Amino acid sequence: MAVVAEGKRGRLLVLRPNTTHKRGAVDSAALSASADLLENRGTAPRQHRNTLVFLAADDEAMDGLSHEVRRFLAWQSVDRDKDALNLDANQRKEASEGRGTSDRNVGVRFAEAWRWLLVPTQPVRDGNVGELEWEAIQAEGDDTSIIARAARRLCANDTMIPKWSPALLKMELDRWFWNDRDRASVKTVWDALTAYCYLPRLLDEAVFVEAVRAGVASGDYIGFATSVSDDGRYEGLVIGEVATVHLDAASVLVKPDVARKQLAAEVPEPDSPPGVEDERGRYDAGKRKETQPPVSPKLPRRFFGTIAVNPDRPGRDMGDVAEEVLQNLTTLPGAKVRVTVEIEAEFPEGAPADTQRVVDENCRTLGFETHGFEES
């Protein structure tokens, strides 16, 4: 088996044709090869495991591809040896057309065959990290390029993240890095993101740096400091403005309330207002006005919303909902967010039996609470 070098950038590894996967399989050749590549870098253990996803061919589709390749080679041989075979004009035309048709069919079969994305994950339940699991995702579509189709599917369901929200970054910091301290090393966080499969899988370092930069500039999510002094003071501390983010061991990500507290303490106090001195001491010359403490408005405690998504691009629309709405709700203290997906479809000519069978099987696999076909 080939040795895949270490790296901190997300990568899609296309497995060999004889390393196939089958729907529902838990011990396919593709899963075995993927597990070995994930765990090992040659004879050494792999460090940055959360950068790899795998693309494997379907077992049955590979049979069809192999058959079509043999057909193409046969037509190619006949077309190449047409003179030696003493073919007439009609036979030569048939051989040429057969070769061209089979060549196109090979391309179609090839694109259909490499359809399984094998994604390593570690579920987290009640704060506990589970064992490594494999998620098999079908990467289907109209693209003739298996890489373009796989990349689109990976990004659509956040299996590989090309742009990360600072709110989601803060969620991970709160959960894994800030739970018992006020800061975390920038390098430590990035190294963990590339190593552990229970954390989000980012496309590359630039995605992480941009999320940090946006979170610092917003003033709501993260403070950034270039180093920490011996007395615990954050040097070069920034929050609420654009920062130059350094991905090194000295730089740290600081809890926003801690960052604001230090910056507030460093602001010089304004000069004392003018006053008058008499035998009782100094008192303010201006008339004092008693002020009432502001009354906090009553905050809403529930949110609800519905939206129609484009059935041709559901991944894109649901991604927008997750980034623009859900991430703002899930970051609120104690928030309990529940999301359900409801699908309604009508077919003027009815749903064929094979479509019903495939949809029912996929719904059961995905864990639908209810599903079914019915007459209108």
Image: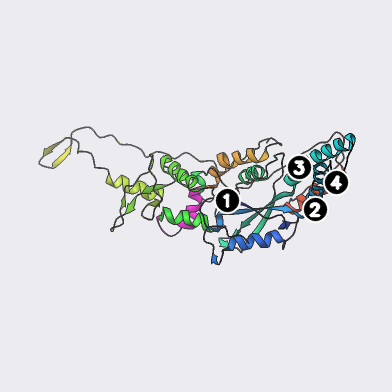
Q: Amino acid at mark 3?
A: Val
Q: Residue at x 52, y 61 (%)?
A: 47
Q: Earlier in the sequence, mark 2 or mark 1?
A: 1
Q: Amino acid at mark 2?
A: Asp
Q: Earlier in the sequence, mark 4 or mark 3?
A: 3
Q: Which mark is residue 354?
A: 4
Q: Residue at x 82, y 38 (%)?
A: 96
Mark nearer the viewer, 4 or 1: 1
Is 176 contained in the magenta span? yes
Q: Earlier in the sequence, mark 4 or mark 2?
A: 2
Nearer to me, 4 or 324? 4
Q: Distance from label 4 to label 2 (Cα)? A: 21 Å
Q: Earlier in the sequence, mark 1 or mark 3?
A: 1
Mark nearer the viewer, 4 or 3: 3
Q: Amino acid at mark 4?
A: Asp
Q: Which residue is mark 2?
A: 63
Q: Which residue is mark 1?
A: 11
Q: Distance from label 2 to label 1 (Cα)? A: 27 Å
Q: Secondary structure at mark 4?
A: helix
Q: Which residues are magenta?
A: 169-183
Please identify the quadrant where the N terminus is shown: bottom right
Left of 285 or right of it: where is 121?
Answer: right
Q: Which mark is residue 108?
A: 3
Q: Secondary structure at mark 2?
A: helix
Camera sees residue 376: no
Q: Distance from label 1 to label 3 (Cα)? A: 25 Å
Q: Is residue 319 above or below residue 27?
A: above
